[in-house]
Amino acid sequence: MSISFEIEAKSGSARLGRLTTPHGVVETPVFMPVGTVASVKGVSQDILEELGVQILLGNTYHLYLRPGVEQVRQLGGLHRFMAWPRAILTDSGGFQVFSLNELRQVTEEGVKFRSHLDGSSHFLTPESALEAQIGLGADIIMAFDECTEHPVEPERVRQSMELTLRWAERSKKCFEAHKQEVPWATDHVGPDVPVGAGERKLAGAAERQIAEDETAELRSAGQVRTPAPTWFGATQALFGIVQGGMDLALRKESAERTIEIGFPGYAIGGLSVGEPRALTREVVEATLQHLPADKPRYLMGVGTPEEIVEYASLGVDMMDCVLPTRAARHGLLFTSEGRVSIKQARYAGDQGPLDPNCGCRVCQRYSRAYLRHLYAANEVLAQVLNTVHNLSFYLDTMRAVRHSIALGNKVQLFPGEQSQAKP
Amino acid sequence: MSISFEIEAKSGSARLGRLTTPHGVVETPVFMPVGTVASVKGVSQDILEELGVQILLGNTYHLYLRPGVEQVRQLGGLHRFMAWPRAILTDSGGFQVFSLNELRQVTEEGVKFRSHLDGSSHFLTPESALEAQIGLGADIIMAFDECTEHPVEPERVRQSMELTLRWAERSKKCFEAHKQEVPWATDHVGPDVPVGAGERKLAGAAERQIAEDETAELRSAGQVRTPAPTWFGATQALFGIVQGGMDLALRKESAERTIEIGFPGYAIGGLSVGEPRALTREVVEATLQHLPADKPRYLMGVGTPEEIVEYASLGVDMMDCVLPTRAARHGLLFTSEGRVSIKQARYAGDQGPLDPNCGCRVCQRYSRAYLRHLYAANEVLAQVLNTVHNLSFYLDTMRAVRHSIALGNKVQLFPGEQSQAKP
């Protein structure tokens, strides 16, 4: 067992899904906050739980450089290392190698690059990226891919797509050979394990029986999150990535040939690399048509609140983006009334909440005047509170999207403000 | 009404007290975390409440410069501005003018100094410092004083002490003339007002009756914190500051003449300015003898965990220090097993909690390895979590001190590890 995925409702092309992982259930469409180096910058894990985060994204490239994969593996994997009992997805590192390293050298074997931290030289291959992700132990891991810049020569796009396909095969082969080496291979994990219970190592059949009895007891007491059985010997799930630049024919070919290799989920990569938004949308919509309906579809690295709603309406199940967290650090806040640049002097005397329609800790307690002061005074709490609010806004947005799908309504931003009638 | 102070138990020279302010009860001896510019760096107010913080310290000098007193006053005062319903104390600004401004010019009238932020020129007098503190609206405010460096000529110490005494008289006179101007003068405040209820402005007698009925109802439902009556028209409490450098005779004279002016509480200022710790202790012990037993005694700007326990054992009721919060930002953590410099590589693989005897959110969830990683990776969460732990350690330390006094035990660090027999 690695993951299972059930579609519970549909509305147009949008799907309401239930993605079950070894570390809990993820309701889709889902937005995954980015915890680059095993931390969503400034926000403690208990606050993330309170916000309802069901899955976090970690960056393999950053974790590989610091603290290092072996360190995390020895400490039981990312979940235990960062005290996060819920699901985690790691990217392959390919995008960071692409975006943070101007001097990278790509060969058939892999990518040579220099650390952005200390300039040290590193070589990542599909195999070493996979082994890194197995050592980190996320629930969902990604095949190693190459991203291409935009705009670029058509021939370069095809070459890159072909390379990504060959790397996808190598990634899968490596995964199949090593998937039992995930740090929690012998842990008592499973979607119905209560928070905090995943810490014990279970050695033999007797211990398994004890754990199963315990779980049954907890389940009957209503203390477990889902009725699914506890999984022993669970493994990670490896997703393939569709490339092909902005060429719709190449996207189709990439999708078909990636599906031929066979993965439990598929990502659309290589977007948000500088192309116009309308083009992103066109490529996403075209690519989705070629992805299997019964597998989760993950659009990497998007987007604004409007965009994540739109992509969900097209049938995307999973998304991630640094926008809510990075924008928060720059004082750009997303609200139901539009963007607020909290650094502006106009908010210095504003006693109202940041977003009157938001129920997060920040909007329930603090005024715009206070948030503006914290930002202007360069106080660390500004970053903390701004990030909590922006994440809350993104998660609430996706919660509303899921609710709309469940009701069979049109998926749109702030459905509460629209007519309740079905379209 | 401003404050009331009752001593509930004694053990040696140490006193267990109950300081009732317009914004709640403070159990003494108390350590007050420092929230320099209306924020304890990195920690949200709800976490401070959870830690059991009953009183915060704000720095008048910093708030005067940014966001400015008038801004805070117009927003209802510090409590409402920073959404902190419990007690606050502001210092007079004298110590920051002294420590942050090498080019300050002291005259009989006041102190001319340049902002450490933008170099702009400012002039603080006892009256303007008092008006600033009334505008900020803390529960306890401090007379404007001059601090002297150490070591210094004896004649300079006397001159400074005499100046501080004249400034104390001017501070009191100004306070008496303007104390009704506190921003919450017409608020429904009082030690038994439940958290969050202090937000309403009450205009007349009818509203007061409604509020009193409401409070009585809440009290009978067990939802208010103390049985004291709600205060209407409460004012701030102005404390005097004893100076006199390291000269015990001058300290005695300063204490006696400050008491003659008459304040509801007395602070010992001018220490922790570079003198040896043994001398600090000697001056504190000698000065305490000359302070009235029935008034709160506040030792400004100390100290380490060992020191705050020692000063409490000598009869100090209130202390504040940036040490736990500033040390946290530099990775220096206080634990029941001693200091931990979390940046050290030896903790990189340490799966144990920071302090196995600590019940704080940080020690209950995260490993030393994770905290070390966050610090090494320069993650903001390092500062947040380190600060939460250090504050928790300081507050727990004072909680243990109060417990020892209640039991009549000797006041010492980690009394739980000692014999339970009375000395």
Image: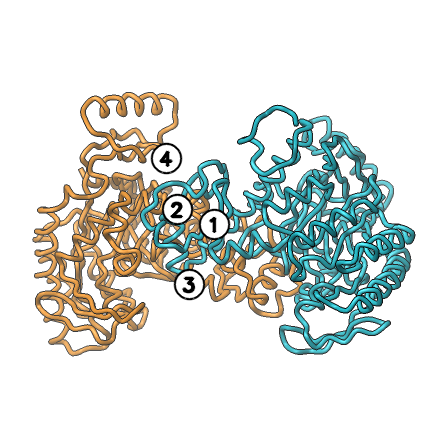
Chain colours: A cyan, B orange
The numbered disc on residue B196 is 4
Splitting the image into 4 quarters, where does residue A316 fall? top right
* Image point (84%, 64%), residue name: A158
Residue beneath label 2, please? A368
The number of numbered badges drawn on the structure is: 4
Instruction: State the residue position of label 3.
Output: B326
The image quarter in which residue A257 lies: bottom right
Q: Which residue is mark 1?
A: A385
Q: Are marks 1 and 2 on the same chain?
A: yes
Which chain does tag 1 point to? A
Residue B69 placement (x, y as % from top left): 24, 53
Q: Is residue A241 visible?
A: no
- The mark lying in front, picked from 4 and 3, is 4
Q: Does the CB distance between marks 1 and 4 fall below 8 Å?
A: no
Going from N to C along the chain, the mark reached first, 1 or 2, is: 2
Marks 1/3: CA distance? 20 Å
Same chain assignment for discs 2 and 4: no
Under tag 4, what secondary structure?
loop
Quadrant of image for the N terminus of chain B: top left
Tag 2: amino acid:
Arg
Q: CA distance from mark 4 to mark 3?
A: 29 Å
